[in-house]
Image: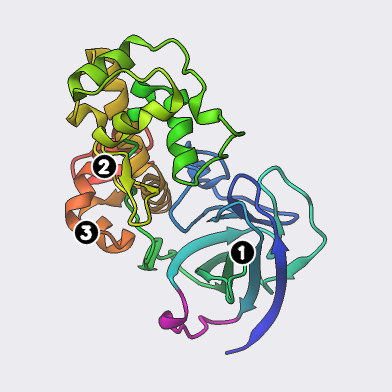
Amino acid sequence: MALLGFYEDDEYLPEYGTIVIRQRHPTESLPNTLLHELATNALFGTVATAGDGWLHLQADDAFQTVRLEAHDVAPPLEPAEWEDVVELPFHSGSGVVAVDTLTGCDSDALLHLATRGFFRVRVARRAADGGEEGDVWSVWFWPVSGQPLPPCWLKRTRAAVQNPNSGWEQVLGRSVFEVLWSLTGRGPTGPDGWLDEPLPEPTESLRSACAQLGVALPTIRRGTTELLSAAGLLLDRDDGGYRLAENPPLVTDVVRLPTELARKIEADALRSRYIRLASDLTCVAAWQNPARVDGLAELLNIPGEEVEPLLRYAVSDELVRRDGDEITA
């Protein structure tokens, strides 16, 4: 076992929350075009996704530490050192990769993988030490022969299934939500007297929500607190301040809405819950082409009961096609 080379960047700034690694100077590509970068609409995975000459890591907009390593065989793994770990197939027609950006930067800092063809790539993530911003990422490449093994998420600490978008902003309006963000420290506090300024003319959906919740229609920003509390969005703190509810109820579970609006909000809630995990699913489907449904829970490292709702969403959003017990991207 040998380390063949490495590259490290401790101040990588992602574009659109995505760390990008791409091959340089490819001499060939795979006939499976679903593995080409941006070939599908599945863009944002839970940890990482990979294909023919590309690798996307799901980060945030803070500076990140990214280390790439080339090995001749699989290096040892200490799972306790990392919060999230995934192993993915990767193909390079050149055997040369570089840290890049989503829109492309043609970096000269290259990592030579010593050969061309198929690789296994392991991506591991943990929070940065000592209160520093961002995360620390290690990315190990090693060559493989034969049919590549499918993507496999080995360890998760961040939730694969997200909390759904509650839909309240579409009903109450942005002006009411600006107060919510301000009171809970998620947005600017505004100048002196800002909370006593009048709200815009209320929409019909705001009037209806207030009537159904049994609260007065607010006329100034400060008056929205009763409404936000009744909706389950705003909670009291022990020190007299407010905090944002971590998992507020869906608006469609609390108030009656026009049919078309309710359908849109429920579709948005489903999408926000599964969109990142659906990218992982699409990566599995594209590499296996087709993938078996009965192995998805283990590969994705999710509870078995989440598989069918995930598949329903991915099919409805035309990310995968299902044919009995198999799916294709």
- Label 3: state its secondary structure: loop
Q: Which residue is mark 2?
A: 311
Distance in Å between CA atoms under marks 1 and 3: 31 Å
Is residue 172 shown left or right of residue 89?
left
Q: Report the magenta residues as a range.
A: 72-82
Q: Amino acid at mark 2?
A: Leu
Which mark lies nearer to you, 3 or 2? 3
Q: Which residue is mark 1?
A: 133
Frontmost residue, 315 versus 262: 262
Q: Amino acid at mark 1?
A: Glu
- Label 1: state its secondary structure: loop
Quarter containing the N terminus: bottom right
In the rendered image, residue 144, in percent from the top left (x then y), is placed at: 51, 72
In the rendered image, residue 235, in percent from the top left (x then y), is placed at: 31, 45
Earlier residue among tags 1 and 3: 1
Distance in Å between CA atoms under marks 3 and 2: 13 Å
Distance in Å between CA atoms under marks 2 and 1: 35 Å
